[in-house]
Image (spheres, rainbow, N blue to C red):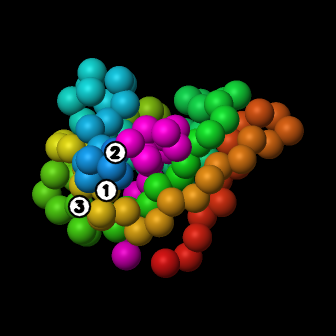
């Protein structure tokens, strides 16, 4: 199983769960897809884009269950990043986990086994 991850504010995920759908962040909506990260990319994503942010969640998804709307496309450093081209059904999440800030104010990524 290939796991992909979304880092986002807890309040945004909880609101999405109430509706059953996550429509993405402002950046996701601007770009036309939901930005996700692979296992190897999620820590760098946390460092680059979420430093100093509290109240974050790491949400895991099975790439296979996301189907054909999930594409792996070149992004930073020409790495292939998972991009989801639709609203994301929240019931597809495998799990969610709170991300805590380290002493360097970078969210700490602690993944669970599925």
Most extreme residue toward the left, as rendered? 68
Query: Is any atom of residue 4 visible in this view?
Result: yes
User: Can you give x and y, in whole percent of width and height, for residue 84 in the image?
Assistant: 25, 46
Are the residues at dot 3 and dot 2 in contact (C-beta closer than 8 Å)?
Answer: no
Quadrant of image for the N terminus: bottom left
Q: Position of residue 64 (x, y in %)?
A: 25, 69
Precedes in sequence: disc 1 or disc 3: 3
Distance (Cα) linking label 1 and label 3: 11 Å
Residue 40 located within the stretch drawn in magenta: no
**What percent of the width, then of the height, locates residue 6?**
44, 48
| Labels 3, 2: front one | 2
Query: Do tag 1 and tag 2 residues touch (Cβ < 8 Å)?
Result: yes
Badge 1 marks a residue whose secondary structure is helix
Q: Is residue 97 left or right of residue 86?
A: right
What is the spatial separation of the Cα atoms under label 1 and label 2, in whole angstroms? 7 Å
Q: In this view, does 71 lie above or below 101?
A: below
Q: Name the residue under label 3.
A: 66
Residue identified by numbered label 1: 90
In the image, residue 3 lies in the stretch drawn in magenta: yes
Which residue does the image show at 58% across and 42% down from the upper left? 56
Relative to the observer, which residue lies in front, 59 or 32? 59
Q: Nearer the viewer, residue 13 or 24?
A: 13
Classify mark 2: residues with Cα within 10 Å, few (<14), some (14-19) or many (20+): some
| Region in magenta | 1-15
Q: Which residue is drawn at 55% across and 48% down?
A: 57
Residue named by callout 2: 16
């Amino acid at each position: 199983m290939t796991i992909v991850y979304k880092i986002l504010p807890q309040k945004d995920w909880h609101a999405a769960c109430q509706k059953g759908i996550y429509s993405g962040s402002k950046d996701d909506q601007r770009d036309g897809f939901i930005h996700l990260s692979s296992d190897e990319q999620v820590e760098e994503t946390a460092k680059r884009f979420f430093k100093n942010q509290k109240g974050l969640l790491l949400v895991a998804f099975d790439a296979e269950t996301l189907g054909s709307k999930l594409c792996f496309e070149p992004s930073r450093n020409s790495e292939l990043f998972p991009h989801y081209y639709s609203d994301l059904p929240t019931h597809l999440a495998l799990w969610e986990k709170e991300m805590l800030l380290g002493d360097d104010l970078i969210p700490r990524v602690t993944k669970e086994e599925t």
